Image (tube, rainbow, N blue to C red):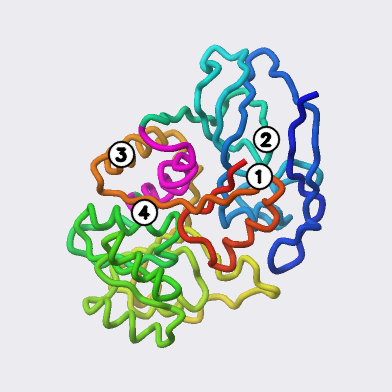
Amino acid sequence: MATNRQVKLIARPKPGLFAREDFSIEDASLTEPGAGEIRVKIEVVSLDPAMRGWVNESKSYVKPVPLGGVMRAYSAGIVDASSHPSFAVGDAVQGLLGVQQYAVSNGKGLVKVDLTKAPIERWVGGLGMPGWTAYFGLLDVGEPKEGETVVVSAASGAVGSLVGQIAKIKGCRVVGIAGGPEKCRYVTEELGFDASVDYKAGDLASQLKTACPNGIDVNFENVGGDILDTILLQMNVHGRIALCGLISGYTATEAPPGPKNIRAVLTQRLRMQGLIVFDWADRIPEAIEQLGTWHAEGLLKIREDLQQGGVDAFPDVVNMLYTGSNNGKLVLKV
């Protein structure tokens, strides 16, 4: 009898990294889709920093994953059974399908993807939610103008790497902040950023001043903490900060301090705005089309870190996000 292997959340994680004991890996019976539903055989699961927040009971932009529920995740796969007029067997789709081998869906929120244009893992990476986040977060929130200086933290990551490349397309000077010589080399030599700053090398403020002699007009912030505090003091008047993530505090064992240099928001008349990709749900086709065009033209380079091991590997592989040991968009092969 066919089964569906699933990762379920069974305990609210303690501060710090995920523990394998937070999850249960179970075989459930394989469900047939009802009227107006489809079943998707999942091929890949996107691993994203936001997962650490999705399991906490604190107030957020979505309800926490319920205890005993399948772990929330963007996944992509192939429709293998359908009773839905808009989806046929063989269609490739992506959406919030969870960490499991199969998912039954009514089709709401699912996006069809074209595997002739890119492999399936790219549709949960640079052409999927991370790409949409970069596209809308930079262009709608950051509002970069030609000739301005854009600084991107976590610049070698799934979102940051695309933000910097889009900023270059828009004619900006782009500086990436990354951890270690190899990631910094990747940012400049392969992605085409104008400069990179290694936050692990020390003296971040001095490095940043050298890389940004005319100050910073736009900051796309993925990290927070000391990096954001350093950037605040080098922002130009009427600069914009697109606050996408605060990953430096996601696994903190105690509440991190607030920005010490928040006064710069007042004195420099900065605009700081948080962003969640769901805010642009009705414009996702626009992002897919434009990102796909740039990718086909060779203007966007996208790299996935495809991990093996299936759903059983999820509890261990997901922590690579918080230790910085992944290289590119972290994706789990189911």
Residue 238: in sight, yes or no?
no
**Secondary-structure class at tag 2:** loop
Residue 320: in sight, yes or no?
yes
The residue type indicated by label 3 comes to: Gln
Q: Which disc number belongs to residue 101?
A: 2
The spot of residue 178 in percent (x, y) is 42, 70
Instruction: Name the N-terminal-most of marks 2 and 4.
Output: 2
127 part of magenta stretch:
yes
Query: For the magenta stretch, what is the residue range?
Result: 117-139
The residue type indicated by label 2 comes to: Gln
Measured Cα–Cα span from mark 4 to mark 1: 27 Å
Q: Which disc number belongs to residue 36?
A: none
The spot of residue 238 in percent (x, y) is 29, 67
Q: Tell me if mark 2 has few (under 14), some (14-19) or many (20+) residues whose alpha carbon lies within 10 angstroms of its own.
A: many
Measured Cα–Cα span from mark 2 to mark 4: 29 Å
**Secondary-structure class at tag 3:** helix
Q: What residue is shown with label 1? A: 310
The spot of residue 158 in percent (x, y) is 45, 55
Q: Residue at x 40, y 59 (%)?
A: 160
